[in-house]
Amino acid sequence: MSMNIYEALRESHEMQRTLSQELVRTVGNSPERLEIFESLKIELNAHAGAEERFFYMPLMNLDAGLSISRHAVSEHHEIEEMLEQLTEMHKSSAHWLIKAKKLSHTVHHHLQEEEKAFFQLSGKLLTEKQKISLAKSYSQELVRLRKMYAEA
């Protein structure tokens, strides 16, 4: 049986949760902190791009999905801004860790909101065929974007 969009999204969500939890446990300007941060940044950016294209855009075309989709995209933008700030900051500063913890909290909140509220609503708006088709497109785009961000 083919994977649906929710199963595909949850795979990346679990990776994001794990990486963000690992990140806030790192110390100083360690190679571990730099590696985990880079991995998290790639995953968050690739996931947001693929999710917006192959989950939120189809929902935005439906009146009942417009508001919730716009809210999710605005949260993606907030996360993207936090990543940019963390990228520019010195990784060993106490302020960096405070900002990283805020990022982790924001990511966890966003994922929980998606899985509890957004998945419920969209489940009523999308057909089973759409859910499987979107999963395939999302997964292909996620792989492409991960590669693109890793090479950037």
Image (tube, rainbow, N blue to C red):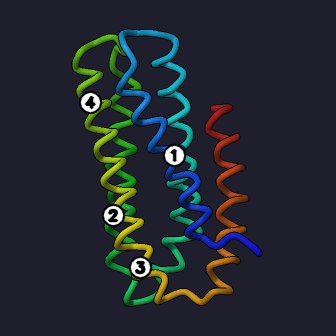
Left or right relative to 83: residue 134: right
| Label whose residue precedes the other's in the sequence (3 or 2) | 2
Distance, label 3 to label 2, CA atoms, is 10 Å
- Nearer the camera: disc 4 or disc 2: 2
| Label whose residue precedes the other's in the sequence (4 or 3) | 4
Q: Amino acid at mark 2?
A: Glu
Percent position (x, y) of residue 19?
Answer: 48, 35
Left or right relative to 132: residue 109: left
Percent position (x, y) of residue 127?
Answer: 59, 89
Q: Amino acid at mark 1?
A: Asn
Q: Residue at x 48, y 89 (%)?
A: 125
Front residue of 56 and 1: 1
Front residue of 136 and 86: 136
Q: Residue at x 63, y 86 (%)?
A: 128
Residue 45 disc label:
1
139, above or below 22, in the image: below
